[in-house]
Image (cartoon, helix red, strand yellow):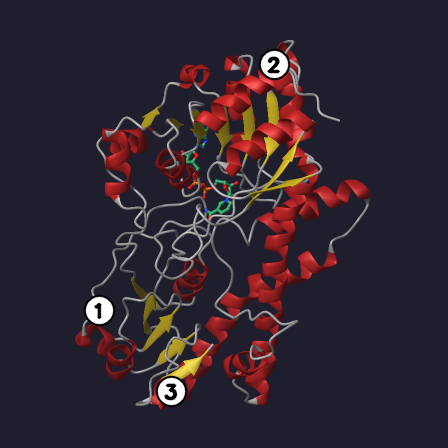
Amino acid sequence: MSDKNETCSKLLEMIEKRTARIGIIGLGYVGLPLGIHFGRKGFRVTGFDLDSRKIDKLLHGESYIKHIPAGAVKELIDAKQLDVTIDFSRLQETDCILICVPTPLTEKLEPDLSYLLNTTETIADNLRIGQLIVLESTTYPGTTREMLLPRLESNDMKVGRDFFLAFSPEREDPGNQKYTATNIPKVVGGITRSCLDVATAMYNAITRAVPVSSTQTAEMAKLLENTFRSVNIALVNELKILAHKMDIDLFEVIEAAATKPFGYTPFYPGPGLGGHCIPIDPFYLAWKAREYDFSTRFIQLAGEINISMPYYVIEKTMEALNKHRKSLNGSRILVLGVAYKKDVDDDRESPGYAIMKMLLGKGAAVHYNDPWIPKLHTTRKYSFQMESMPITPELLAEMDAVIIVTDHSDYHWDEIVEHSNLVIDTRNATKGIKENREKIVMA
Ligand SMILES: NC(=O)c1ccc[n+]([C@@H]2O[C@H](COP(=O)([O-])OP(=O)(O)OC[C@H]3O[C@@H](n4cnc5c(N)ncnc54)[C@H](O)[C@@H]3O)[C@@H](O)[C@H]2O)c1
């Protein structure tokens, strides 16, 4: 039954006329493209971030994410369609607030909701009648209802009557040219019927909304999607190790299997998982499951296999060097690609770093090249002080081995193989290379 009241009808009308102002909290890989998308669809957008350097750049019409062109930002800033600020009291000017802050794991692999809870407190302090709040950050089922709702209702504001609360998972795939915010459907769950109605109307204005019965369903849908990926990647990673022992090319196997027109989706093995989603999100579900005395065995197993892959790359590298009467200790190794996937500048949770750390730990001299990441910065886990080395025939020839971690489109594989002594290919990037195949080891 609908609980639509005058406040709800007014917001629906503003969304329909695109006079509703959209507020986006957290202008990172998710929030910035989303803000641009709403702006292009005719909404006025205010972006909020704690990082004043990001805000300064945006105000100057610059972008800090490589695959988002500065022109896209500048155009909207100049047209006053997009405004950005660190002043969170301006949340009161907005009608629909979308939360896109990080939801990482703690060192003990437990959900770290600190960013989300800080943001919720800030929204609660500024909440006014008639606003819609949507959580887009990935999280475990129950977060919106259990963690956000009580905090937002604490000032005598009633959900579904005074304000609206929903969850809609972000499905952004950075760098994907085919599927962008314009054509990726948005699953939406509301706390009440009117919450669902306003959130659905807002997303229908920019893409296709897929309403579901609760916020928990929408939260779980996102975790199903990413757990599905994690488990399937683990499956092919495990099979890759077996296929090596059996002297079968698993990539060829996958291409063959993928000709089946139904019931099979190809996934590809690699050096391990990276990025802000697949290595992290399934653990949110595993953590919540413990509250129900339930052990998510697929998630644990997939995690174990995927985490072991960088070790496997090291093992294959040592074996390959050994065949050349060399030890890893003292060898010069060039790592190609530290972004977690091709053609993006995102290096979060990159398996490249796990590989580099192990190489250094075993006494190798390590260099890297990544056209998308010119310099390495200290992170919570790693502190490499390195700059990307330009790839030249001389550099390649000096290296005892080159490890392909990320198959960026800019790389010229034929030249890389030609000038290298040994190539450890974790991505099947060199599959088209006919010459010098004896130098290539697949890991
Ligand atoms: N990156 C992806 O491909 C992707 C895809 C789908 C879903 N997600 C999910 O979206 C969420 C955001 O991810 P992201 O990749 O955009 O992260 P990000 O680190 O790129 O961006 C987060 C931004 O939030 C800002 N921030 C942190 N705390 C804040 C606060 N209290 N108030 C305002 N701003 C704050 C940070 O400064 C940063 O700019 C996460 O839950 C993630 O799991 C990410």
Q: Residues within 10 Å of mark 3 (few under 14, many from 20)?
A: few
Mark 2 to mark 3 CA distance (whole Å): 79 Å
Q: If you read the primary sequence from the N terminus, does the residue marked by circle 2 or circle 1 appear first? A: 2
Is 63 rendered above or below residue 17?
A: below
Residue 131 in view = no
Q: Judge by depth and name the residue closer to the eye, 385 or 294.
A: 294
For the image, the number of numbered tags is: 3
Q: In the rendered image, which residue does mark 1 sit on?
A: 391
Q: Image quadrant of residue 398? A: bottom left
Where is residue 71? Give x, y as percent.
Answer: 23, 42
| Residue 223 vertical position relative to residue 193 in the rendered view, above or below | below
Foreground of the two, 235 or 400: 235
Mark 2 → mark 1, Cα distance in angstroms: 64 Å
Callout 1–callout 3 Cβ contact below 8 Å? no
Q: Nearer the viewer, mark 1 or mark 3?
A: 1
Which three-letter amino acid code belongs to the residue tagged 3?
A: Arg
Q: Secondary structure at mark 2?
A: helix
Give the residue at x 38% y 51%. Answer: 346
- Badge 2 or badge 3: first in the primary sequence: 2
Give the crowd class for mark 2: few <14, some 14-19, many >=20 residues within 10 Å: few
What's the amino acid at mark 1?
Answer: Ile
Q: Position of residue 228 (x, y in %)?
A: 63, 59
Question: Considering only vertical position in the picture, is 76 above or below 391?
Answer: above
Dividing the image into 4 quarters, which one contains the N terminus?
A: top right
Q: Is residue 114 above or below residue 6?
A: below
Q: Is residue 351 left or right of residue 168?
A: left
Q: Residue furthest top?
A: 156
Q: Which numbered disc covers residue 325?
A: 3
Task: Name the residue: 29% across, 81% down.
Answer: 417
Q: Give the labeled residue for mark 2.
A: 6
SS label for mark 1 = loop
